[in-house]
Amino acid sequence: MLDFIVLFLTVGIPLSSALLLASLGESVNQRSGIFNLGCEGVMSMGAFVGMMIPYAVGGSGKVAWYVNLSGLVAAALAGALLGLLFGVVVIRFGAPQGIAGIGLQLFGTGLAGSLYRHFIGGAEGVAGINAIRIPLLSKIPILGDMLFSCNPMVYFSFIMVPVISLIMKKTPWGLRVRACGTMPRAADSMGIKVQRTRYEALAFGSAMAGLAGAYMSLCYAKLFTDTLIGGRGFIAVALVYFGQWSPVGIMGGALLFSLAQALQLAVQAYGFATFPYEFLVMTPYVLVIVVLIFASKRKHVGPASLGKPFNREMRV
Amino acid sequence: MKKVTALLLSLMMLMMTCAAFAESVAVVYPSSVDDKGWCQAMDSGIRTAIDNGLEIDYTPVENVDTANAANILQQLAGEYDLVIIHGAQFSAALSEVAEEYPEQVFAVGTSDAIFGDNVFSYMPQSEEPGYVNGIIAGLITKVNKVGIVGSTDGGDSARYVRGFVMGLKASNPDCEYMLSWTNSFGDTAGAGDIAQTQIKAGCDVLVGPAQQAIGAIRAVAASENVTFVGQTISQLEDFPEVVVAAADYAYGAVVSAILEQVAGGVTGGICIPMNYNNGGFVYAFSENADLLPADVQAAAQEALSALEATPDTLAGYVDVELN
C-alpha cells in the first residue's frame, strides 16, 4: 500500500506544474479584470516554441542548458505576444472577452499545430530538460524521490506561488493590477493607467501560460503534438475560480486535480479497479466540476470588474 | 509542324491511357502520416507497395477528426475509385456516407464488421504481433514486471493487448504486468503519463499500441534501464537505443487485395483479415545484442514461423481476462 501511495504522489506532483504555472498566470489576468479563456491556445504556442528552439539547434539530441533555457524564454515571449494580441482585441476594441478567448484558443492551437507541421512534422521530440536529484535531500527515503528528484521547472512553478502572492499583495504594480480589476474607474481617478496596466498583466499572465506549455513539451512529454495540452488550459481557468484568485488556493487546486489524475493512473496500474477504466479516466474532470459547484457557493472574492471592458469616456 | 502536333497528341493520348489505368485511392487519416504509429504504418505500407509495382494514384488526407469525418467522406465520394478511412472511430460516419453514395467503393479499418455492399473492412489480427511482443517482453524483463500503455479497449488495440498477455504468460508465467488505458488513440501526453507511472512503479519493459505510443517511448527513452517493444518498425528505427523489436502492418497487401476484388466485380461486403500467414504483418528485430539477446530473438522467430505457417492459432485471445 505504501508503494501505491508513494507512486501516486511521485507521479502527481510533476503533473501539477503545467496547471500551476498557467493558473497563476490566469489569476494575474483576472486580477486585472481580463478573463482570458484562450489559455489553452497560449499554452499550445508555448509548447511549440519551447520545443522549436532546442530542436532547431540540436534536433532530438542533447543540447546545452542555455539552449533549453532559450526555449523557455522564447515560449514566455510567445505567450506574452499572444497575450498582447488578445489585449488589443478586448482592451483596445472592447470585444467580448469570453468569445475573444475562444478565438485565441482556436488561433493558438491551430497556429502551433500548423507551424509544427511546417517546420518539424511527424512526432519528433527533444532531449529536453531532465529531472535533477538534489544532493543529500534526494536520498531521504520516500520523500527524496517524491520531492527532491523533480524537474527544475517543477521547483520553479512552486516557487512562483509565494512570488506571485508577494507581487500581487506587496508591490505597487500588483496593487495597481488589483485596483484595475476591482474598481477600474476609481483606479483611473487615482492616476493609474488602467488599460496599460491590463496590457501588462495580460503579457505577464500569458507569459506564464507560455512557460506552462513549454514545460509540457520540453520537460514533461519532450515532444509536441496537437493534443499535447489536452484541455489543461481550460482546467487552469477553472482552477483560478477553485482557488478563489489566491495563489495558495490555486496551488491546492492544481495539486488536487493532478493527484486525482495520478490516482487514476496508479489505480489502473495496480489493477485495483473493479469497474470500467473509463470511469477512472473521467474522475479528475468530474472532481473539478464538483469542486467548482461548492466553490461557487463560497463568498465571492474575485475581481469585481472581471470581464468588463473599461472606457474612461463611458458613463457608468 | 504536323510531326510535332502528332507527337504531342500521341504523348497526350499516352498520358490519358496511363491515367485511365492507374486507380485513384484516397486514404483518410486521424493524424499525420508521419506520426510514427498508426497512420505512418498505413502510409508507408502503401508507398512501399507503389514502389513494388502497385499502380495507383494515392492521396492521403491527414488529421481528420471524428466530427468532420462524414463531411470529408462526402467530399471525396465520386472523386476516387477507392476511399479508405483508416480508423475504427470513423465507422459510424462511414456507414452514413456509404448509404448516401452507393456507387462509391469505401474501405474501413480496423473492423471486422460488414457495413454494406460498397464497403470493405479490414481487420488486423493484432493478437499475433502482440503475442510475439509478449514472448520477447517476458524473456527480457529482469524484474518480472512489464507495463502496457493501452489506448482504448476496442478494435485491434484490444486484440493486441490480449495477444501480448498470451505471449507474456507463454514465455514467462511468473511475469506480472501493469495495464492502464488512456481511453484514446491519440493522447500522446496521456500515454506519457501512464508510461512514467509504470516506470516509477518498477516496470522495466513497456509496450503500447496506437499512434499515442510515441509519448510512452519518449518516457522510456528518458529513463534508465527500461526498454520498449514496438508496434511499428519506424519506432525501432527512430529509437534504436530503447526499442528492442517491432511488429508492423503491411497495408499495401490490403489495398492490393481490395483493388483485386473490385477488378473482379466485388465492391464490398467482405472483411479482409491481416495476419502473418497472408503477409498482413511484418516483424523486425534490433541489431543491438545488448538489447535483444540471440536466444530471445530465436524464441520470437520460432513464434513468428508458427504464425506464418498456420493462421488463426490465437483465437483464444477473446478469453484472456485482463488485470
Image (cartoon, coloured by chain):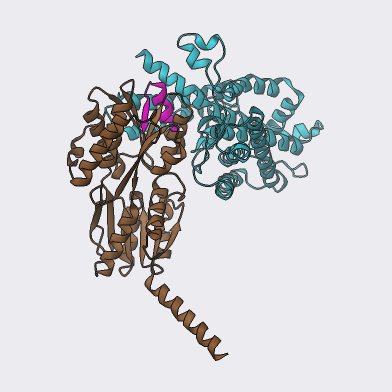
Residue at position x 25%, y 61% in the image: B116
> Residue B35 lies in what quarter of the image?
top left
- Chain in brown? B
> Residue B181 lies in what quarter of the image?
top left
Could you tell me which quadrant the N terminus of chain B lies in?
bottom right
> Residue A61 lies in what quarter of the image?
top right
Residue at position x 37%, y 59% in the image: B52
Q: Of residues B58 and B268, which is closer to you in this image?
A: B58
Is residue B215 left or right of A280 when viewed as pictured? right
Q: Position of residue A189 (x, y in %)?
A: 80, 33
Is residue A226 left or right of B243 when viewed as pictured? right
Q: Position of residue B80 (x, y in %)?
A: 39, 67
- Chain in cyan? A
Please say whether residue B112 is visible from this viewpoint.
yes
Count up the numbered dots. Answer: 0
Q: Position of residue A39 (x, y in %)?
A: 58, 38
Residue at the outermost bottom position: B2
Residue at position x 19%, y 46% in the image: B309
Please say whether residue A276 is visible from this viewpoint.
no
Q: Of residues A269 and A24, which is closer to you in this image?
A: A269
Residue at the outermost right position: A191
Q: Position of residue B312 (x, y in %)?
A: 18, 45
Is residue B145 left or right of A286 when viewed as pictured? left
Q: Is residue B43 above or below residue A52?
A: below
Could you tell me which quadrant the C terminus of chain B lies in?
top left
User: Which contiguous range is marked in magenta?
Assistant: B192-207
Q: Of residues A170 and A73, which is closer to you in this image?
A: A73
Residue B183: in magenta span: no
